[in-house]
Amino acid sequence: MYLVSAAALFGMLIKCQSDKKKSIDPSAYNFEVSPVIPADESIKLMQVEDGFEVQLVASEPFVSSPVAMSFDGKGRLWVVEMQGYMPNADGVGEYTPNGKIVILEDKNKDGVIDERTVFLDSLVLPRSICFVENGILVAETPQLWRYEIVNDKPGKRILIDSAYAIGHNLEWQANALYRGLDNWIYNPNFDKRYRKKGTQWITERTHFRGQWGISQDDDGRLFYNNNSQNLIGDFFTPGLGAANPDQSTVAGFSENIVADNRLYPARPTPGVNRGYMDNVLDSSLRLREFTSGSGPAIYRGDLFGKDYYLNAFVAEPAANLIKRNILEEKNDSVTGRQAYAGREFLSSLDERFRPVTLYNSPDGALYIVDMYRGIIQHKSMITRYLEKEIEKRDLGQPVNCGRIYKIVPKNKKPALLTMPEDPVQLVKLLEHPNGWIRDKAQQMLVDGKYPEAIPLLKEYLDKPQNPIPLFHALWTLEGMQALQPDAVLALLKNPGWRIRRQALSVLSSVVSSSNYKTFADIFQEMIDQNDSLAAPYIAFQMQAIQQFDKKLADKFLLTLAKKYTENKFVSDAVISNMANREKAFYNSFRKDGFSDSLFIMRGLKKIMNDVANYQSNQDKIELANRFPRGARLFNNNCQACHKMDGNGAPSMAPPLNNSEWVVGDKKTLISIALHGLTGPVEVNGKVYKAPEISGDMPGLESNRDIVDEDIAQVLNFIRNSWNNTRTKTEDITSQDVHEVRKKYSGRTAPFTAEELKGQK
């Protein structure tokens, strides 16, 4: 740890504020240029919801290229600086070890940072942090590390995961490290979750979620998004339904929560990657829909008022704005709508205002991490069009600016709460109206393992009239390994659904060989009482029962499948328990008269086909040896959207597996690889369109790091993978790629499916 030198701060300040001018008049702002604007002047270019104001927390020279942050118990900001991201329009030098984790502190308590301490430096593209016990997790491409914190200095370092953020496309790497209500650490753009139990770090498979940023509601359900969708999320608590690795999608997870993706920027936004395409920009050159959605926050603070509580705020850095969505729950499903028509909660005239992540806070304000730079599109997908926009307005430099703001109601003075160390006071804070305070109190209790807190926590389990502290107490006891089965059994009988839901979610932590039959009896009562809300949770939790009594678990699965034949949530929950047994269950259901049109039969049949296709595929090692550059390119650039099994990620991309576009005409496939594909596309008899998939697949033609031989190899790799091996195809050569590239030289727009069909 060290305090940054005055000389270094001065140098940073000169670079970032070299264009400092007199006070800016928003009404006379020139959109043809994109100057670096001092933070206090940039605030004047922001249009925020009536009754609110934006306040500066930190700017250069105290922060540079921030992408993530976290508060510690003292109210200090720990900020991740990704200074290596796109250091120029070509991305040259992005792996320079210049990233940092810094501690920002407001010493004089005026609300503005006045001290910067570097905790870690010389990091390669750091992306997220998370406090656990007396240490901090740090995601540094490609590893996940844990550092002890000793007097604000890094102590012992251990490796948690050597493959946390792999691949060369930084927009599609794991991030966020979000510590959920259930004490697990979740990540968008990833299918792993982490947790420390005793002295061991545990890694488990979970659902693949979103792209950049993640948040939770008071019930612990996760919400996230991708670059082209406003808000995605889970209907169920996060630890359920991921036990079957061959089940690519599970109903109730990665659901499209807010379908309306319309944007209302305050300024023309021509500097977006696909600005040349029809309907990307409106007649005033403003971005119409999300193209770089990120960093959502479910607001759980106590400062904005009840109308804003549990609203979903979403950042859109390409459009220089923050959107507000209002969420509603009905029959255990969550839906949402935009709060306004024709305007945003916050929008800016400053093109370099890049809100990448939003956060709840200990003072109840909504915090904004502003990367503040011209370029936010990674080189792996940057288009020629955007390159020209960057050159036109000199957006490439500087790249060492950065700001952190907070949004507060006018005439309210937020105050940071310093978290106490006393466990009795921490337990009391589980009742606090601010969700950040409650979460932090729970985490500190779990990390501290205070025995004197246990009886106080148990008292909350007998107070169902106030469910939120009960939730925290329940999961705090679980995290301290002090939760008793009898307590969970009692909560399963509570008339309040939200309480029963938490009990159904936590019971796998206490079920054992001596008590599983007691839990099974309560499950049967719920089924007999037609508790349709509990039914998917019962099915999910058969994973816990079957380790003690597989026959009993299978009996429950059959009962649920028969009782809820038209319920997709129950059907998929049942299937989540059937790893490697799908065929046996399918045949059993057929004998019982189940129609192939039922949800559960369609789901089982899809998995059976996918497994058969994978098993019939040739040795992946041999294929990688045959097309080594293609295998690397697929892993680095393609698998995030299309997945390793070729079946496509939810809300991202259609399948490459068993696709006529892949095994068909090679020139058509090359055209897609070079220039991309936009709009709906039919694959194997099914039409894929937004929001089921992203509306656009970017092409590789503009990426100078990818040559013709690379493209030929990756196309050969996918043509010889999965079920595609059933169709005999000829190899694609670099000369084939060269000819198609030459044919469409100068093309900037992606192809449509109809356009490609017309060329066959």
Image (spheres, rainbow, N blue to C red):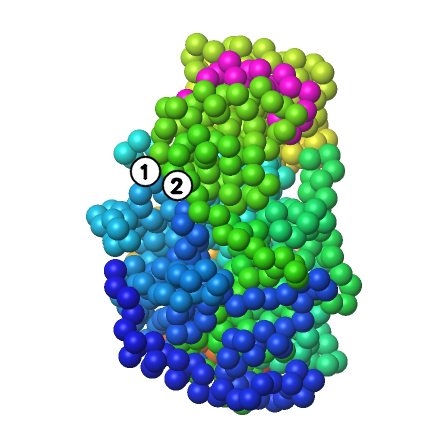
Query: Percent from the top left, x then y, of residue 460?
Result: 55, 24
Residue drawn at the location 56% of the way across and 39% of the way down: 432
Labelled disc at residue 194: 2
In terms of depth relative to the viewer, which is nearer, 289 or 11? 11
Q: Tell me the magenta residue range.
A: 481-499
For label 1, the residue is: 201
- Residue 60 figure quarter: bottom left
Q: Is residue 508 above or below residue 434?
A: above
Of label 2 and label 1, which has the lower sequence position? 2
Find out whether residue 493 is within the magenta segment: yes
Q: Is residue 292 above or below residue 541?
A: below
- Residue 279 figure quarter: bottom right
Identify which amino acid the numbered label 1 is placed on. Trp
Residue drawn at the location 63% of the way across and 29% of the way down: 466
Labelled disc at residue 318: none
Q: Secondary structure at mark 2?
A: strand
Query: Percent from the top left, x then y, of residue 657?
Result: 52, 52
Identify which amino acid the numbered label 2 is placed on. Tyr
